[in-house]
Amino acid sequence: MTIFLGANDSAIRDLSPRQHVSVPDYKKHIHAILDIVRAVSPATKIILITPPPLDEDTWTAINLKYDSIPGRTAEHTRLYRDACIVTGQEARQFHGWGNDLAVIDTWELFLGRERMEKVYAPEDVQDFYVDGLHFGQKGNQALAEAILKTIKNTWPELHPDSMQEKIVSFHLIGANDNLPSFLFHP
């Protein structure tokens, strides 16, 4: 299961009060979600995904084009990224998640380890987005690959390459395989 929250929560309260969630509430909400998942499905593995670095220039330009207030900054979003990482650490250490929880840091993913802690230029991340906030093809591809890599490295038994098919692929089923006739419409 993935939990990918914070891009909207990190809206600045005075500029976008309907979307803003304080950092303490953000952390509390993630812990609450984790508690519910653990109670309902104790064997579930979780990947927390940090809110991504904002392409502030593009996001601002698009919002101003439509007479909308951007309501976000990269600096403010970083607070939620940091809170997500800390929440993951707390859950693993103090809430019994251990190795059942992993965190993908989208800042490291998009910027690289050496640049993620520094101020970055919006053009460093613009190729990952369609509008500065929502992923485009490159952003979705990068995140999908990071999810698969995290699964392979953390829970290799759950990686698609390691799993056995439990359902026979439809192209392997013939008309004479003694299956119910409703499966085969002319």
Image (cartoon, rainbow, N blue to C red):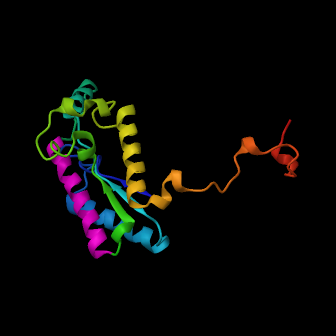
Q: Residue at position x 47%, y 70% from top?
A: 43
Q: Nearer the viewer, residue 117 or 161?
A: 161
For the N terminus, the image quarter is bottom left
The residue under the point 20% across, 32% down is 124
The answer to which image quadrant residue 173 occupies is top right
Chain part drawn in magenta:
74-95
Name the main secondary structure of what is drawn in magenta. Answer: helix
Q: Where in the figure is residue 69, as x and y percent of width and height?
A: 22, 35
Q: Position of residue 36 (x, y in %)?
A: 42, 70
**Left of 67 or right of it: where is 167?**
right
Question: Residue 56, located in which quarter of the rendered image?
Answer: top left
The number of discs equals 0
- Single out the residue that lies furthest toward the left: 118
Rendered residue at 23%/52% (across/down):
81
Asked if the magenta segment contains residue 7, the reply would be no
Residue 82 lies in magenta, yes or no?
A: yes
* 103 left or right of 1 in image: left
Check the image and name the residue furthest to the top: 65
Q: Decide: is 10 above or below 158.
A: above
Image-based side of 144 in relation to 124, left or right: right
Is residue 171 shown above or below 162? above
Residue 71: x percent and y percent? 21, 40
Q: Position of residue 86 (x, y in %)?
A: 22, 62
